[in-house]
Amino acid sequence: MENQESCLKSVAVILPSLNPDHRFKDVVDGLVGAGFEHIIAVDDGSDAEHRQWFEEIKANPQCTVLVHEVNKGKGRALKDAIAYVHEQMPQLKGVVTIDGDGQHLLPDIIACADRMLAEGDKVVMGCRDFSQPGVPPRSVAGNRFTAGMFRLCYGIRISDTQTGLRAVPAQYLEFFTTIEGERFEYETNMLLQMKRAGIAFVEQPIATVYDKEEYSSHYNALKDSWRIFKVMAKFLLSSGAAFLIDTIIFYILMQLFGARWGTFASTISLTIARLISSFVNFNANKSFVFQSKGNYKRTMLRYYILCVIQYMVNAALLNGTVVLLSRAVGHPIAAWASTLVHIVVMTLLFLISYPIQREWVFSEKK
């Protein structure tokens, strides 16, 4: 009971909402009835017909309503509410963000808040079980897609990427207000930036609730999935561009000087191509992809330590394979064949080097 009382008094609940219905009022009434003393609702540009629900909850002294005159998106609503708590309620120990449509049950909200207080320095993610019957297919498909991308591209293992029930300790609130994203992509960016900054999270199992008759969402499956995918895609775009630069330069050099350089043609071509593509890749990764604010020289040193090791492995595999193939056919293989071998080797090494760049070269973990 002591922990629950502490949670009710020291944790603010944040509810962003656009054109809510009676469920929004039910959620707030439940929070007030449970004893939460700090409830921050955000009217994200609701029309006149739906503003009544915000007016009604203002009667509760525990409730504060922040108003966006026009719709600015869930991400902006969350950031504005988080900033409000950080600036106006510095005595609190954290916030819990929830949805206002009744998907998050009161016991689960309290459990996440309690877990956050118990963990101290970890964000708590309220995670649903998508294997249960009755979950909308678009939610199942969307979560599986993003969960797979998170694991493959960023090394983040999370079972519910789309959950809106998240408990954030007070020491991270200011950081969360600086994360990019104005709409649903903000919640994805939150996970990515937590990973980059070394902020750990734990999963708290919660109930999976969907109202088949009244379930509605402002999540536009196509538009907002594309916003999320763009965030993920930029992590691969830089490497893809460097890969193309490397491959094109390698092919041109092999075509122009392959016969003149003889046995060392592939090694020389690879060296020149890698020097150019690696410099482009490093600067793109630092500024555009990982947005690293670490020391430029230190980060570059780490990058080129990895680059030299990767180059040595690449050169050995490439040159060895080209020599073996040339001996097998009785003459030097064509430039296109050498380039094909180069592509295969580069792809294999990318699968190894990418997580090293993510976890070590551009990481800002202390």
Image (spheres, rainbow, N blue to C red):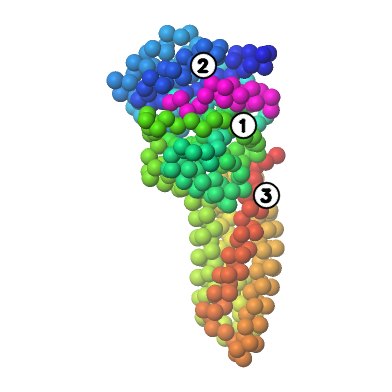
Residue 45 falls in which quadrant of the image?
top left
Q: Residues within 10 Å of mark 2 (few under 14, many from 20)?
A: many
Q: Earlier in the sequence, mark 1 or mark 3?
A: 1
Q: Is residue 284 above or below residue 260?
A: above
Amino acid type, label 1: Gln
Return the residue at label 3: 360
The magenta span reads: 101-119
Q: Is residue 213 above or below residue 242?
A: above
Return the residue at label 1: 204
Return the residue at label 2: 31
The C terminus is located in which quarter? top right
The residue nearer to you, when weighing 19 against 128, is: 128
* CB contact under 8 Å: marks 3 and 2: no
Amino acid type, label 3: Trp
Secondary structure of residue under mark 2: helix
The residue lying at 59 percent from left, 48 percent from top is: 151
Q: Is residue 128 above or below residue 69?
A: below
- Considering the whole magenta stretch, tell me its main secondary structure: helix
Residue 3 falls in which quadrant of the image?
top right
Query: Marks 3 and 2: which is nearer the front?
Result: 2
Q: Earlier in the sequence, mark 2 or mark 1?
A: 2
